[in-house]
Amino acid sequence: MDLTTKYMGLSLSNPVVAGASPLSKELDKVKALAEAGAGAIVMHSIFEEQLAQEALALNYYIEQGAESFAESLSHFPPMEAYKVGPELYLENIAAARKAADVPIIASLNGVSLGGWIDYAGKIQQAGADALELNIYLIPTNRKVSGTKIEKAYLDIVKAVRAAVSIPLAVKLSPFFSAPVNMARKLKAAGADALVLFNRFYQPDIDVEKLEVAPRLVLSDSDESRLPMRWIAILFGRVRLSLAATSGVHTGEDAAKLILAGADAVQVVSALLRDGIGQLTKIRDDMAELLAAKGYRSIRKARGVMSQKNCPEPAVFERANYIETLQSYPQSPAAV
Ligand SMILES: Cc1cc2nc3c(=O)[nH]c(=O)nc-3n(C[C@H](O)[C@H](O)[C@H](O)COP(=O)(O)O)c2cc1C
């Protein structure tokens, strides 16, 4: 079966991509991901806060004596927490590019218009084949409307687009009022691809200690259904490449997302939980499943079950919600 796919203009040997994760912090793991057959590798993110912190520090040393330096940094995580600083990040891109014969996609993570956007140009110079822009925004300001939030996203994408000529993917949250409309606006702002969706890591409350603490839980296969729905809806409606992220653990998960319309599927939790070798299994099982259904290429299988092409387009909409609720069997325990 021909597994090749085009993702935002990049030619991938297959659609299974190693998503942004700590695995890309080590060169031997980058090599292992390429050897396991990753179609591309997304580097872990470099954060706006990290770049701002560097710039602040530099400013401090140049100007000597901004007393507020430590205070101004107090809302940032300590620099050591990032493990890889801005210079090392660029070196890691160049090293990954050299060591692995697959496209290397850098990841830049930010929420505001600021000096950090210039760093996108450095990422390009370092040799990244493409850039994934992760806009991880938690809107809490009561005075800021959804329209303003959308504009902020678009302004960031435009600014990054102006800074680089390499392909640009935007990793988005699922929380938009009108996702298809937003996707089209992101395309107009300069995005080449969407990565759906950013998985939000919810803080948890420790009742014993009365503390709010981060608690990272890896995904499971069911979580792939949120990107699956929206990829199926977006397929054929926007001229953007579509990558799925969240809940790809098996070849079947990957096959479903391709059938929904994904150009690429990103895998992280499965690799962290079961090892890098899981990537090969996902790729091979996906290929076997699609071949068994008579598809001779990813291109032929892609989007066959999208909303546009599937026999019952309503299953992706409200009708399906009502039907799903009605179909839940009454359990004897509940009566
Ligand atoms: C430990 C860990 C670190 C991650 N680091 C990043 C990151 O640096 N940048 C980013 O955009 N996503 C990051 N992610 C999110 C993943 O790229 C991915 O979108 C998410 O885990 C959902 O995919 P999965 O279900 O395959 O895990 C991270 C996820 C995990 C579990």
Image (spheres, grey):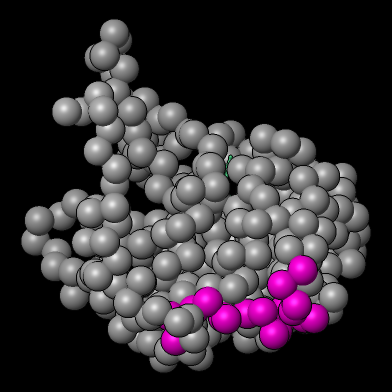
Residue at 63%, 80% (x, y): give it.
Answer: 302
Residue 246 on the magenta segment = no
Compared to residue 314, the image places residue 101 above or below, namely: above
**Viewer-side residue, 146 vs 220:** 220
- Is the C terminus in the top left, top right, bottom left or bottom right quadrant? top left
User: Based on the displayed image, in which of its 4 quarters is residue 129 positioned?
Assistant: bottom right
Residue at the far left: name it: 143
- Is the N terminus in the top left, top right, bottom left or bottom right quadrant? bottom right
Is residue 62 visible in the rendered image? The answer is: no
User: Based on the displayed image, in which of its 4 quarters is residue 77 positioned?
Assistant: top left
Residue at 48%, 34% (x, y): give it.
Answer: 216
Residue at 52%, 68% (x, y): give it.
Answer: 195
135 sits left or right of 150 in the view: right
**Residue range of the region highlighted in magenta in the rendering:** 292-308
Q: Main secondary structure of the magenta part?
A: loop
Residue 306 on the magenta segment = yes
